[in-house]
Amino acid sequence: MGVAARPVGRGGLSSRNSARRHGHEKPEAQKQEPTLTIRPFSIMITPLQPPSAAPGERGCAQSLGVIMCMTFLRLYLAAILCSAANPHSAAPISDLSSPSQQVRDDAAKVLRDKFTLPPRARWESTLAAVKPGVSKESVLKLLNQFNVTLGGITASGQTFTESYRLDDAWESACSYQRVDSAETVIKPTRYESLRDIWVAPPPDFTGVWTTYFVNGQQSREIHYVSGHYCGVFTAFHSEGSKSCVQHDDSSGANGEDTGYFPSGRVSYHARYKNGSPVGTWTHDKEDGSVLATTKHPEPEQMTPNSEGLGKGSAISIYFEMLRLGRVVRSPDHGGIAVC
């Protein structure tokens, strides 16, 4: 439909290695000006020639002032060029996509101090045109001008909701109504949702694999053995608090699985045995009251006709997507999108 879909599942962004070109500037023989010769990761500055002054035309103080100004200017330019030659200082957000854990860690450290949230107001005038009754085609035509990407989709009957990634910090969601072949906006919303950058580990990786949000906060910290989850799986909210903690071994998810609100209160509690959901799962409101519960049988009690239970049940899929960070909540429209 003209909007690029975000990858589904555990896939993520591939690493982007930016190649830098270095020019070489030659000084002109006729001019008595300081010149720079630039080579990769090095800078050579030719000696500065003081301006010639005829007796009585310029005083020593004036000549010294010119020399000091030119020296300061050269040092300032050298500092800028050195910064540009450093691949890690140029684009720390891009470095979060690196396959190197050290590069990602270093970039995240910089971003935690330097990241600035893009203002919500930058989208006010653009999204003002997205109103109830506007066609989906018009919405997509408008958003395509800004390279907006499609996020999650959820549907129910003749209505469905699509979320769109506007930039590194903001998403918009549009609920549509489908009547015959026409699809029109029912309710548009936008909300803060920092982009997290997933990078897949090597196929046989063993160790701790950490990925980050664009603000430098951890997104996931996963323990692997030979390319498989083994140990503690921890996901985080974008401000740094834990989102969920699960435990895995060679048989899959095994043991307690607990989710948290940004406040630290429990949002859900689940349990797995050998990769299958077991026991009573609860999904709580932030005030501590129970929103929903689902009972799962022990694996030996499950039969092929146990519809609605086990790994393939809707609530099991929901919790799994929540664990993987693929569930998007919008505080404005109250919907849930699995992407």
Image (tube, rainbow, N blue to C red):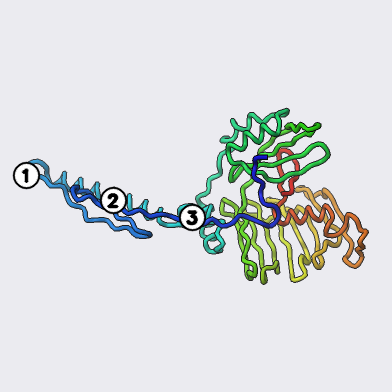
Answer few, some or many: residues within 10 Å of disc 2's Cα (few below 14, many 20 plus, some between 14 and 19).
some
How many marks the image carries: the answer is 3
Kindly indicate the quadrant of the structure image that contains residue 197: bottom right
Amino acid type of the residue tagged 1 in the rendering: Pro
Answer few, some or many: residues within 10 Å of disc 1's Cα (few below 14, many 20 plus, some between 14 and 19).
few
Q: Residue at x 68, y 40 (%)?
A: 1
Mark closest to the chain's N terminus, 3 or 1: 3
- Distance of label 3 from label 1 (alpha carbons): 54 Å
- Residue on which disc 2 sits: 74
Q: Is residue 265 left or right of residue 311?
A: left
Q: Residue at x 61, y 41 (%)?
A: 148
Kindly indicate the quadrant of the structure image that contains residue 44: bottom left
Mark closest to the chain's N terminus, 3 or 2: 3
Q: Nearer the viewer, mark 3 or mark 2?
A: 3
Q: Is residue 101 left or right of residue 279?
A: left
Amino acid type of the residue tagged 2 in the rendering: Arg
Answer few, some or many: residues within 10 Å of disc 3's Cα (few below 14, many 20 plus, some between 14 and 19).
few
Kind of element beneath mark 1: loop
Q: Residue at x 53, y 53 (%)?
A: 94
In this rendering, the answer to whether 164 lies above or below 236 is: above
Q: Position of residue 140 (x, y in %)?
A: 66, 36
Q: Position of residue 5 (x, y in %)?
A: 67, 46
Q: Position of residue 194 (x, y in %)?
A: 62, 47
Q: Is residue 141 left or right of residue 296?
A: left
Q: Nearer the viewer, mark 3 or mark 1?
A: 3
Q: Position of residue 113 (x, y in %)?
A: 51, 52
- Distance of label 1 from label 2 (alpha carbons): 28 Å
Amino acid type of the residue tagged 3 in the rendering: Ser
In this rendering, the answer to whether 123 lies above or below 317 is: above
- Residue on which disc 1 sits: 55
Kind of element beneath mark 3: loop
Checking the image for residue 18, the label placed there is 3
